[in-house]
Image (tube, grey):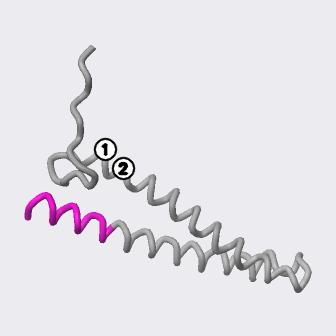
Amino acid sequence: MNKKSNTLLFILGGTVFNIFITILCFIVLMVVYFKLLQPSFPPNATGVALPVIFVLSIVVSFLVYRAAIKIIMKKVDMEKYFDPIFGPRKPPRKS
């Protein structure tokens, strides 16, 4: 496989991973809300809680995705296996 196909597969895999983590976080936060928190809130608070849970699941999935990418970047030489997305990387300037 060449660098372009590796990059495409990496982006697709990362997207699927991010969507999966978002759905998982949403389900976990919904269970936590309805099992633990809902009895302590008024009945009409669910209308506010659902969008908050949705946004929280996106934020948590973004943080998990960033942590996973950092771990992958430490273990894999990205420039060796992946093609730059936005153009070639500029060499560092000499002082």
Q: Quadrant of residue 92?
A: top left
Q: Secondary structure at mark 1?
A: helix
Q: Which residue does the image show at 68% across and 73% down from the upper left?
A: 53
x%, y% of residue 88? Answer: 20, 45
Is 11 or 74 nearer to us in this picture? 11
- Residues at circles 2 and 1 in contact by the CB criterion of under 8 Å: yes
Q: Quadrant of the N terminus?
A: bottom left
x%, y% of residue 83? Answer: 18, 54
Q: Residue furthest toward the right?
A: 42
Is 81 or 74 nearer to us in this picture? 81
Q: Quadrant of the C terminus?
A: top left
Q: Is residue 73 magenta?
A: no
Q: Taking 44 as reference, is 64 above or below it?
A: above
Q: Quadrant of residue 14?
A: bottom left
Residue for badge 2: 71
User: Mark 1 belongs to which amino acid?
Assistant: Lys
Q: Is residue 5 magenta?
A: yes
Q: Which residue does the image show at 72% across and 79% down from the upper left?
A: 50
Q: Which residue does the image show at 91% across and 81% down from the upper left?
A: 42
x%, y% of residue 81? Answer: 16, 53
Q: Residue furthest toward the left?
A: 1
Q: Which residues are magenta?
A: 1-13
Residue for badge 1: 74
Going by the image, does 81 lie left or right of 49? left
User: Mark 2 belongs to which amino acid?
Assistant: Ile
